Image (spheres, rainbow, N blue to C red):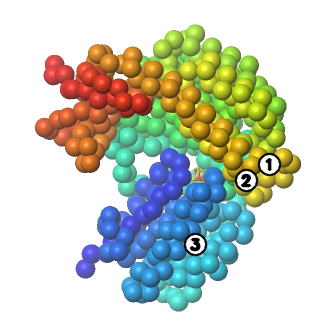
Protein backbone atom coordinates (compact mmCIF):
# COMPACT_ATOMS: atom_id res chain seq x y z
CA UNK A 1 0.00 0.00 0.00
CA UNK A 2 1.32 3.42 -0.93
CA UNK A 3 2.06 5.86 1.89
CA UNK A 4 1.70 9.58 1.31
CA UNK A 5 3.21 12.78 2.67
CA UNK A 6 1.96 16.35 2.60
CA UNK A 7 4.22 19.29 3.50
CA UNK A 8 2.90 22.72 4.46
CA UNK A 9 5.57 25.42 4.06
CA UNK A 10 5.57 28.92 5.54
CA UNK A 11 8.18 31.67 5.23
CA UNK A 12 11.06 32.39 2.92
CA UNK A 13 12.90 30.59 0.11
CA UNK A 14 15.18 29.06 2.70
CA UNK A 15 12.17 27.18 4.05
CA UNK A 16 10.90 26.32 0.58
CA UNK A 17 14.24 24.66 -0.11
CA UNK A 18 14.27 22.97 3.28
CA UNK A 19 10.86 21.51 2.53
CA UNK A 20 12.48 19.98 -0.56
CA UNK A 21 15.05 18.40 1.76
CA UNK A 22 12.22 17.11 4.00
CA UNK A 23 10.54 15.68 0.88
CA UNK A 24 13.84 13.95 0.04
CA UNK A 25 13.92 12.30 3.48
CA UNK A 26 10.27 11.22 3.27
CA UNK A 27 10.67 9.73 -0.19
CA UNK A 28 13.67 7.75 1.08
CA UNK A 29 11.29 6.30 3.68
CA UNK A 30 8.95 5.22 0.89
CA UNK A 31 6.38 8.04 1.13
CA UNK A 32 4.95 9.67 -1.99
CA UNK A 33 3.81 13.26 -2.29
CA UNK A 34 0.07 14.08 -2.21
CA UNK A 35 -1.78 17.38 -2.50
CA UNK A 36 -4.72 16.31 -0.38
CA UNK A 37 -3.85 16.66 3.30
CA UNK A 38 -6.68 14.25 4.24
CA UNK A 39 -5.02 11.41 2.33
CA UNK A 40 -1.62 11.95 3.93
CA UNK A 41 -0.01 9.40 6.26
CA UNK A 42 2.41 12.06 7.43
CA UNK A 43 1.88 15.83 7.46
CA UNK A 44 4.89 18.08 8.04
CA UNK A 45 4.53 21.77 8.92
CA UNK A 46 7.68 23.73 8.08
CA UNK A 47 7.09 26.89 10.06
CA UNK A 48 8.20 30.54 10.08
CA UNK A 49 8.22 33.10 12.90
CA UNK A 50 9.48 36.24 11.17
CA UNK A 51 6.24 38.09 12.02
CA UNK A 52 3.36 37.34 14.33
CA UNK A 53 0.97 36.55 11.49
CA UNK A 54 3.31 33.84 10.13
CA UNK A 55 3.25 32.25 13.55
CA UNK A 56 -0.53 32.51 13.88
CA UNK A 57 -1.02 30.99 10.46
CA UNK A 58 0.88 27.89 11.53
CA UNK A 59 -1.01 27.61 14.84
CA UNK A 60 -4.34 27.88 12.99
CA UNK A 61 -3.47 25.15 10.51
CA UNK A 62 -1.98 22.77 13.08
CA UNK A 63 -5.14 23.31 15.16
CA UNK A 64 -7.32 22.38 12.21
CA UNK A 65 -5.71 18.95 12.00
CA UNK A 66 -7.01 17.90 15.42
CA UNK A 67 -10.21 16.35 14.11
CA UNK A 68 -8.46 14.70 11.17
CA UNK A 69 -5.93 13.13 13.52
CA UNK A 70 -8.74 11.93 15.81
CA UNK A 71 -10.38 10.17 12.85
CA UNK A 72 -7.12 8.84 11.44
CA UNK A 73 -5.05 7.73 14.42
CA UNK A 74 -1.97 6.46 12.55
CA UNK A 75 -1.47 9.69 10.68
CA UNK A 76 1.78 11.30 11.84
CA UNK A 77 2.04 15.05 12.35
CA UNK A 78 5.48 16.66 12.48
CA UNK A 79 6.27 20.35 13.09
CA UNK A 80 9.66 21.85 12.30
CA UNK A 81 11.25 25.10 11.14
CA UNK A 82 11.98 28.48 12.68
CA UNK A 83 8.97 28.63 15.02
CA UNK A 84 9.88 25.45 16.89
CA UNK A 85 13.50 26.60 17.19
CA UNK A 86 12.46 29.72 19.16
CA UNK A 87 13.28 29.55 22.85
CA UNK A 88 10.57 27.67 24.75
CA UNK A 89 8.29 27.26 21.73
CA UNK A 90 8.67 23.49 21.28
CA UNK A 91 7.33 22.82 24.78
CA UNK A 92 4.52 25.34 24.35
CA UNK A 93 3.57 23.75 21.03
CA UNK A 94 3.46 20.31 22.60
CA UNK A 95 1.17 21.59 25.34
CA UNK A 96 -1.14 23.36 22.94
CA UNK A 97 -1.24 20.55 20.38
CA UNK A 98 -0.60 17.28 22.27
CA UNK A 99 -1.56 15.27 19.17
CA UNK A 100 1.52 16.48 17.28
CA UNK A 101 3.87 13.47 17.06
CA UNK A 102 7.22 15.01 16.20
CA UNK A 103 8.67 18.45 16.92
CA UNK A 104 12.09 19.27 15.48
CA UNK A 105 14.11 22.45 14.88
CA UNK A 106 16.14 24.09 12.12
CA UNK A 107 19.45 22.55 13.18
CA UNK A 108 18.35 18.90 13.10
CA UNK A 109 16.15 18.66 10.02
CA UNK A 110 18.56 16.04 8.65
CA UNK A 111 17.59 13.73 11.52
CA UNK A 112 13.89 13.66 10.65
CA UNK A 113 14.15 10.08 9.38
CA UNK A 114 15.48 8.96 12.75
CA UNK A 115 12.65 10.82 14.56
CA UNK A 116 9.96 9.24 12.38
CA UNK A 117 11.32 5.75 13.02
CA UNK A 118 11.55 6.51 16.74
CA UNK A 119 7.96 7.75 16.85
CA UNK A 120 6.67 4.69 14.99
CA UNK A 121 7.98 2.51 17.81
CA UNK A 122 6.67 4.64 20.67
CA UNK A 123 3.50 6.26 21.97
CA UNK A 124 5.30 9.35 23.25
CA UNK A 125 5.81 12.47 21.15
CA UNK A 126 9.37 12.95 19.90
CA UNK A 127 10.55 16.46 20.74
CA UNK A 128 14.09 17.21 19.61
CA UNK A 129 15.51 20.73 19.35
CA UNK A 130 19.25 21.28 19.05
CA UNK A 131 20.71 24.52 20.30
CA UNK A 132 23.99 24.38 18.45
CA UNK A 133 24.17 25.16 14.75
CA UNK A 134 26.93 22.56 14.19
CA UNK A 135 28.37 21.26 10.97
CA UNK A 136 26.85 21.75 7.56
CA UNK A 137 25.28 18.52 6.33
CA UNK A 138 26.47 17.80 2.77
CA UNK A 139 24.66 14.52 2.11
CA UNK A 140 21.15 15.88 1.69
CA UNK A 141 19.16 14.75 -1.32
CA UNK A 142 16.44 17.33 -1.86
CA UNK A 143 13.43 16.39 -3.92
CA UNK A 144 13.21 19.59 -5.93
CA UNK A 145 9.81 21.09 -6.61
CA UNK A 146 10.67 24.44 -8.22
CA UNK A 147 11.78 23.36 -11.71
CA UNK A 148 13.11 25.14 -13.79
CA UNK A 149 14.55 26.94 -10.76
CA UNK A 150 16.84 25.20 -8.29
CA UNK A 151 17.69 26.63 -4.88
CA UNK A 152 21.27 26.30 -3.67
CA UNK A 153 22.26 27.18 -0.10
CA UNK A 154 25.55 29.01 0.09
CA UNK A 155 25.32 30.24 3.67
CA UNK A 156 23.23 29.26 6.68
CA UNK A 157 22.39 31.48 9.65
CA UNK A 158 23.03 35.16 10.22
CA UNK A 159 25.40 37.26 12.33
CA UNK A 160 23.82 40.64 11.77
CA UNK A 161 21.32 40.88 14.60
CA UNK A 162 19.16 43.58 13.05
CA UNK A 163 17.30 44.67 16.16
CA UNK A 164 13.82 43.65 14.90
CA UNK A 165 14.78 40.25 13.53
CA UNK A 166 14.37 36.76 14.99
CA UNK A 167 16.39 34.96 12.29
CA UNK A 168 19.81 35.01 14.05
CA UNK A 169 18.15 33.39 17.08
CA UNK A 170 16.45 30.60 15.18
CA UNK A 171 18.99 29.97 12.44
CA UNK A 172 22.21 30.32 14.42
CA UNK A 173 25.53 31.85 13.41
CA UNK A 174 26.51 32.32 9.81
CA UNK A 175 28.20 29.31 8.22
CA UNK A 176 29.33 29.12 4.59
CA UNK A 177 29.48 26.03 2.43
CA UNK A 178 32.71 25.22 0.63
CA UNK A 179 32.82 26.74 -2.85
CA UNK A 180 33.73 23.34 -4.32
CA UNK A 181 30.52 21.81 -2.91
CA UNK A 182 28.45 24.71 -4.26
CA UNK A 183 30.05 24.51 -7.70
CA UNK A 184 29.57 20.75 -7.92
CA UNK A 185 25.92 21.08 -6.97
CA UNK A 186 25.38 23.91 -9.47
CA UNK A 187 27.08 22.04 -12.33
CA UNK A 188 25.03 18.90 -11.65
CA UNK A 189 21.80 20.92 -11.63
CA UNK A 190 22.57 22.58 -14.96
CA UNK A 191 23.36 19.11 -16.35
CA UNK A 192 19.99 17.88 -15.09
CA UNK A 193 18.28 20.65 -17.04
CA UNK A 194 17.60 23.33 -14.42
CA UNK A 195 17.49 26.70 -16.13
CA UNK A 196 17.71 29.05 -13.17
CA UNK A 197 19.93 28.69 -10.12
CA UNK A 198 19.25 30.82 -7.04
CA UNK A 199 22.01 31.07 -4.46
CA UNK A 200 20.49 31.37 -1.00
CA UNK A 201 21.69 32.93 2.22
CA UNK A 202 20.45 35.49 4.75
CA UNK A 203 23.31 37.72 3.67
CA UNK A 204 24.97 36.26 0.59
CA UNK A 205 27.44 39.16 0.34
CA UNK A 206 29.31 38.03 3.41
CA UNK A 207 30.06 34.61 1.87
CA UNK A 208 32.56 32.97 2.74
CA UNK A 209 33.69 34.67 5.89
CA UNK A 210 37.00 32.78 6.12
CA UNK A 211 35.60 29.30 5.28
CA UNK A 212 36.97 29.42 1.78
CA UNK A 213 39.34 31.69 -0.16
CA UNK A 214 36.56 32.43 -2.64
CA UNK A 215 34.62 35.69 -2.14
CA UNK A 216 30.98 36.08 -3.13
CA UNK A 217 31.72 37.96 -6.39
CA UNK A 218 34.27 35.29 -7.29
CA UNK A 219 31.75 32.56 -6.49
CA UNK A 220 29.28 34.23 -8.86
CA UNK A 221 31.91 34.33 -11.59
CA UNK A 222 32.68 30.64 -11.12
CA UNK A 223 29.03 29.55 -11.12
CA UNK A 224 28.43 31.70 -14.20
CA UNK A 225 31.30 29.98 -15.97
CA UNK A 226 29.47 26.63 -15.81
CA UNK A 227 28.61 25.66 -19.34
CA UNK A 228 25.02 25.78 -20.56
CA UNK A 229 22.20 28.28 -20.82
CA UNK A 230 20.82 29.23 -17.42
CA UNK A 231 20.07 32.24 -15.25
CA UNK A 232 21.77 32.97 -11.98
CA UNK A 233 20.06 34.74 -9.09
CA UNK A 234 21.00 35.29 -5.48
CA UNK A 235 19.31 36.49 -2.32
CA UNK A 236 19.51 38.28 0.01
CA UNK A 237 22.10 41.03 -0.22
CA UNK A 238 22.80 43.22 2.78
CA UNK A 239 23.59 46.80 1.72
CA UNK A 240 26.47 47.11 4.17
CA UNK A 241 28.35 44.29 2.38
CA UNK A 242 27.33 45.17 -1.18
CA UNK A 243 30.66 45.88 -2.90
CA UNK A 244 31.94 47.39 -6.13
CA UNK A 245 33.41 43.96 -6.93
CA UNK A 246 29.93 42.49 -6.78
CA UNK A 247 28.59 45.15 -9.17
CA UNK A 248 31.48 44.33 -11.54
CA UNK A 249 30.70 40.61 -11.37
CA UNK A 250 27.05 41.31 -12.24
CA UNK A 251 28.19 43.48 -15.16
CA UNK A 252 30.66 40.88 -16.44
CA UNK A 253 28.46 37.80 -16.18
CA UNK A 254 25.54 37.83 -18.59
CA UNK A 255 23.89 34.90 -16.81
CA UNK A 256 23.34 36.93 -13.62
CA UNK A 257 19.85 38.41 -13.59
CA UNK A 258 19.54 42.15 -13.76
CA UNK A 259 17.46 42.31 -10.61
CA UNK A 260 19.16 42.76 -7.28
CA UNK A 261 17.18 42.40 -4.09
CA UNK A 262 18.68 44.92 -1.68
CA UNK A 263 16.52 45.42 1.42
CA UNK A 264 16.68 49.01 2.66
CA UNK A 265 14.17 48.64 5.56
CA UNK A 266 13.88 52.42 6.14
CA UNK A 267 14.93 55.76 4.65
CA UNK A 268 15.55 57.39 8.02
CA UNK A 269 19.05 57.36 9.50
CA UNK A 270 17.68 57.39 13.05
CA UNK A 271 15.51 54.33 12.36
CA UNK A 272 18.31 52.54 10.47
CA UNK A 273 20.58 53.09 13.45
CA UNK A 274 17.99 51.75 15.88
CA UNK A 275 17.50 48.78 13.55
CA UNK A 276 21.26 48.10 13.73
CA UNK A 277 21.50 48.06 9.95
CA UNK A 278 24.98 49.68 9.94
CA UNK A 279 24.37 52.05 6.97
CA UNK A 280 22.69 55.40 6.40
CA UNK A 281 20.21 56.31 3.67
CA UNK A 282 23.09 58.10 1.87
CA UNK A 283 25.24 54.94 2.09
CA UNK A 284 22.40 52.97 0.55
CA UNK A 285 21.98 55.44 -2.30
CA UNK A 286 25.73 55.29 -2.89
CA UNK A 287 25.52 51.49 -3.28
CA UNK A 288 22.76 51.91 -5.85
CA UNK A 289 24.92 54.44 -7.68
CA UNK A 290 27.84 51.98 -7.79
CA UNK A 291 25.55 49.22 -9.06
CA UNK A 292 24.12 51.49 -11.79
CA UNK A 293 27.60 52.66 -12.79
CA UNK A 294 28.43 49.10 -13.87
CA UNK A 295 24.94 47.85 -14.74
CA UNK A 296 22.94 50.93 -15.77
CA UNK A 297 19.67 49.12 -16.49
CA UNK A 298 19.76 46.92 -13.36
CA UNK A 299 16.43 46.64 -11.52
CA UNK A 300 16.43 46.82 -7.73
CA UNK A 301 13.82 45.38 -5.40
CA UNK A 302 13.68 45.87 -1.66
CA UNK A 303 12.10 45.14 1.72
CA UNK A 304 10.72 47.92 3.90
CA UNK A 305 9.42 47.86 7.46
CA UNK A 306 7.02 50.55 8.67
CA UNK A 307 6.11 51.29 12.26
CA UNK A 308 9.47 50.37 13.79
CA UNK A 309 9.55 51.57 17.45
CA UNK A 310 10.10 55.33 17.56
CA UNK A 311 9.41 55.88 13.83
CA UNK A 312 8.04 59.43 13.55
CA UNK A 313 6.05 60.92 10.65
CA UNK A 314 9.24 62.60 9.59
CA UNK A 315 11.14 59.30 9.62
CA UNK A 316 8.41 57.69 7.56
CA UNK A 317 8.47 60.56 5.06
CA UNK A 318 12.18 59.92 4.58
CA UNK A 319 11.33 56.35 3.60
CA UNK A 320 8.85 57.67 1.02
CA UNK A 321 11.52 60.06 -0.29
CA UNK A 322 14.05 57.26 -0.66
CA UNK A 323 11.51 55.07 -2.47
CA UNK A 324 10.85 57.93 -4.90
CA UNK A 325 14.55 58.46 -5.46
CA UNK A 326 15.50 54.82 -6.11
CA UNK A 327 12.48 53.77 -8.18
CA UNK A 328 12.35 50.16 -7.00
CA UNK A 329 10.98 47.65 -9.48
CA UNK A 330 9.10 46.08 -6.57
CA UNK A 331 9.11 46.24 -2.79
CA UNK A 332 7.96 43.88 -0.06
CA UNK A 333 6.44 46.04 2.63
CA UNK A 334 5.83 44.92 6.20
CA UNK A 335 4.32 46.35 9.33
CA UNK A 336 6.84 45.94 12.13
CA UNK A 337 6.00 42.93 14.27
CA UNK A 338 7.38 42.66 17.77
CA UNK A 339 9.44 39.47 18.21
CA UNK A 340 10.11 38.35 21.77
CA UNK A 341 13.81 38.06 22.49
CA UNK A 342 14.96 40.67 19.95
CA UNK A 343 16.46 44.03 20.96
CA UNK A 344 13.62 46.03 19.38
CA UNK A 345 10.98 44.23 21.47
CA UNK A 346 12.29 46.09 24.52
CA UNK A 347 12.41 49.51 22.84
CA UNK A 348 10.05 52.23 24.06
CA UNK A 349 7.60 53.98 21.81
CA UNK A 350 6.09 51.02 19.98
CA UNK A 351 3.90 52.43 17.21
CA UNK A 352 0.10 51.98 17.42
CA UNK A 353 -1.35 49.61 14.82
CA UNK A 354 -3.57 52.31 13.23
CA UNK A 355 -0.57 54.54 12.58
CA UNK A 356 1.41 51.69 10.98
CA UNK A 357 -1.59 50.69 8.91
CA UNK A 358 -2.04 54.17 7.54
CA UNK A 359 1.68 54.40 6.74
CA UNK A 360 1.86 51.07 4.98
CA UNK A 361 -1.13 51.97 2.82
CA UNK A 362 0.60 55.15 1.66
CA UNK A 363 3.82 53.27 1.02
CA UNK A 364 2.14 50.48 -0.93
CA UNK A 365 0.35 53.06 -3.07
CA UNK A 366 3.64 54.75 -3.92
CA UNK A 367 5.43 51.48 -4.66
CA UNK A 368 2.55 50.27 -6.83
CA UNK A 369 2.44 53.48 -8.83
CA UNK A 370 6.17 53.16 -9.57
CA UNK A 371 5.78 49.51 -10.55
CA UNK A 372 2.85 50.35 -12.85
CA UNK A 373 4.87 53.08 -14.57
CA UNK A 374 7.76 50.69 -15.16
CA UNK A 375 5.42 47.98 -16.46
CA UNK A 376 3.90 50.38 -19.00
CA UNK A 377 7.33 50.88 -20.56
CA UNK A 378 7.31 47.20 -21.54
CA UNK A 379 4.26 47.45 -23.81
CA UNK A 380 5.24 46.78 -27.42
CA UNK A 381 8.65 45.34 -26.49
CA UNK A 382 9.75 41.74 -27.00
CA UNK A 383 11.48 40.17 -23.99
CA UNK A 384 13.08 36.82 -23.30
CA UNK A 385 11.09 34.94 -20.70
CA UNK A 386 12.05 31.79 -18.87
CA UNK A 387 8.75 29.93 -18.67
CA UNK A 388 8.28 28.76 -15.08
CA UNK A 389 4.76 27.54 -14.62
CA UNK A 390 1.20 27.18 -15.88
CA UNK A 391 -1.55 29.12 -14.13
CA UNK A 392 -4.53 26.79 -14.35
CA UNK A 393 -7.02 29.49 -13.26
CA UNK A 394 -5.93 31.91 -15.97
CA UNK A 395 -5.19 29.15 -18.48
CA UNK A 396 -1.87 30.88 -19.22
CA UNK A 397 1.83 30.07 -18.92
CA UNK A 398 4.01 32.46 -16.96
CA UNK A 399 7.64 33.32 -16.44
CA UNK A 400 10.03 36.18 -15.82
CA UNK A 401 12.49 38.22 -17.83
CA UNK A 402 16.03 38.89 -16.62
CA UNK A 403 14.79 41.92 -14.65
CA UNK A 404 12.44 39.70 -12.70
CA UNK A 405 9.29 41.04 -14.40
CA UNK A 406 6.48 38.48 -14.63
CA UNK A 407 4.72 37.89 -17.94
CA UNK A 408 1.72 35.69 -18.83
CA UNK A 409 1.14 34.17 -22.25
CA UNK A 410 -0.82 31.50 -24.09
CA UNK A 411 0.65 28.36 -25.55
CA UNK A 412 -0.62 25.12 -27.04
CA UNK A 413 2.50 23.26 -25.96
CA UNK A 414 4.13 22.91 -22.56
CA UNK A 415 6.83 25.58 -22.38
CA UNK A 416 7.93 25.12 -18.75
CA UNK A 417 11.73 25.25 -18.59
CA UNK A 418 12.05 26.89 -22.02
CA UNK A 419 13.30 30.36 -22.91
CA UNK A 420 10.73 32.07 -25.10
CA UNK A 421 10.43 35.49 -26.69
CA UNK A 422 7.25 37.23 -25.68
CA UNK A 423 5.88 40.40 -27.24
CA UNK A 424 4.24 42.39 -24.47
CA UNK A 425 0.73 43.55 -25.32
CA UNK A 426 -0.48 44.90 -21.98
CA UNK A 427 0.70 45.85 -18.53
CA UNK A 428 -1.54 45.20 -15.55
CA UNK A 429 0.16 46.51 -12.43
CA UNK A 430 3.15 44.38 -11.64
CA UNK A 431 2.65 41.73 -14.32
CA UNK A 432 2.55 41.76 -18.09
CA UNK A 433 0.68 39.81 -20.74
CA UNK A 434 1.86 39.07 -24.22
CA UNK A 435 2.21 36.65 -27.09
CA UNK A 436 4.94 34.17 -27.85
CA UNK A 437 6.95 35.27 -30.88
CA UNK A 438 8.06 32.35 -33.00
CA UNK A 439 11.63 32.53 -34.42
N1 LIG B 1 18.14 38.06 5.51
C1 LIG B 1 17.23 38.71 4.70
C2 LIG B 1 15.78 38.35 4.94
C3 LIG B 1 15.23 38.53 6.27
S1 LIG B 1 13.54 38.27 6.51
C4 LIG B 1 17.52 40.17 4.81
O1 LIG B 1 18.24 40.61 5.65
O2 LIG B 1 17.04 40.91 3.99
C5 LIG B 1 12.79 39.20 5.20
C6 LIG B 1 12.28 40.54 5.58
O3 LIG B 1 11.33 40.45 6.63
C7 LIG B 1 13.30 41.51 6.11
O4 LIG B 1 14.06 42.10 5.10
C8 LIG B 1 12.44 42.51 6.82
O5 LIG B 1 12.01 43.53 5.96
C9 LIG B 1 11.24 41.70 7.27
N2 LIG B 1 11.22 41.49 8.71
C10 LIG B 1 12.12 40.85 9.47
N3 LIG B 1 11.77 40.89 10.77
C11 LIG B 1 10.62 41.61 10.85
C12 LIG B 1 9.76 42.01 11.91
N4 LIG B 1 10.03 41.73 13.17
N5 LIG B 1 8.65 42.73 11.59
C13 LIG B 1 8.37 43.03 10.30
N6 LIG B 1 9.14 42.69 9.28
C14 LIG B 1 10.25 41.98 9.52
FE1 LIG C 1 17.44 39.32 9.93
FE2 LIG C 1 19.11 41.31 9.51
FE3 LIG C 1 19.98 38.81 9.41
FE4 LIG C 1 18.39 39.71 7.50
S1 LIG C 1 20.46 40.47 7.94
S2 LIG C 1 18.22 37.75 8.54
S3 LIG C 1 17.06 41.10 8.58
S4 LIG C 1 19.22 39.87 11.21
FE1 LIG D 1 12.71 32.32 6.71
FE2 LIG D 1 10.74 32.77 8.39
FE3 LIG D 1 12.79 31.42 9.17
S1 LIG D 1 11.48 34.17 6.89
S2 LIG D 1 14.52 32.13 7.98
S3 LIG D 1 11.35 30.83 7.57
S4 LIG D 1 11.72 32.93 10.37
x and y, in percent, of residue 251 in the image: 50, 15
Determine if the C-beta at disc 1 is less than 8 A from ligand 1: no
Q: State the SS at label 3.
A: strand
Looking at the image, is mark 3 or mark 2 earlier in the sequence? Answer: 3
Is residue 110 in sight in this rendering?
A: no
Q: Label 2 to label 1, Cα distance in Å?
A: 9 Å
* Picture residue at 53% right of the left edge, 89% below the top: 123
The residue indicated by pointer 3 is 103
Looking at the image, is mark 2 or mark 1 earlier in the sequence? Answer: 2
The residue indicated by pointer 2 is 338
Q: Is residue 262 above or below residue 160?
A: above
Dot 3 crowding, Cα within 10 Å, few <14, some 14–19, many 20+: many
Residue 417 image-quadrant placement: top left
Q: Label 3 to label 2, Cα distance in Å?
A: 24 Å
x and y, in percent, of residue 302 in the image: 58, 32
Looking at the image, is mark 1 or mark 3 earlier in the sequence? Answer: 3
Determine if the C-beta at disc 2 is less than 8 A from ligand 1: yes
x and y, in percent, of residue 405 in the image: 40, 28
Q: Mark number for residue 350?
A: 1
> Which of 39 and 158 lies nearest the eye of the viewer?
39
Q: State the SS at label 1.
A: loop
Q: Are marks 2 and 1 in contact (CB under 8 Å)?
A: yes
The residue at the far bottom in this view is: 123
Q: Are marks 1 and 3 in contact (CB under 8 Å)?
A: no
Could you tell me which quadrant the C terminus lies in?
A: top left
Could you tell me which quadrant the N terminus lies in?
A: bottom left
> In front of the other: label 3 or label 2?
2
Q: Is residue 190 above or below residue 102?
A: above
Q: Label 1 to label 3, Cα distance in Å?
A: 33 Å
Amino acid sequence: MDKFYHIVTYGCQMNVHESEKIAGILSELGYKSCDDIKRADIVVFNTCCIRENAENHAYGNIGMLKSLKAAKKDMLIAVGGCLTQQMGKAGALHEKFPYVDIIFGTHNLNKLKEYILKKQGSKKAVIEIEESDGEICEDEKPLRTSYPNAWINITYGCNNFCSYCIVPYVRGRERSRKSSDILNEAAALVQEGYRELTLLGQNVNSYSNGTDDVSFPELLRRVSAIEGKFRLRFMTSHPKDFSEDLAKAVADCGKICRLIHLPVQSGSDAVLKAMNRKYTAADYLKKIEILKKYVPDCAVSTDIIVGFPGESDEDFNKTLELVKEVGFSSAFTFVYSKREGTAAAKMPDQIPAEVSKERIMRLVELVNSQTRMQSLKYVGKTVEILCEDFDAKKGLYLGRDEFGRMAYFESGENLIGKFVNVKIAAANGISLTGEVVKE
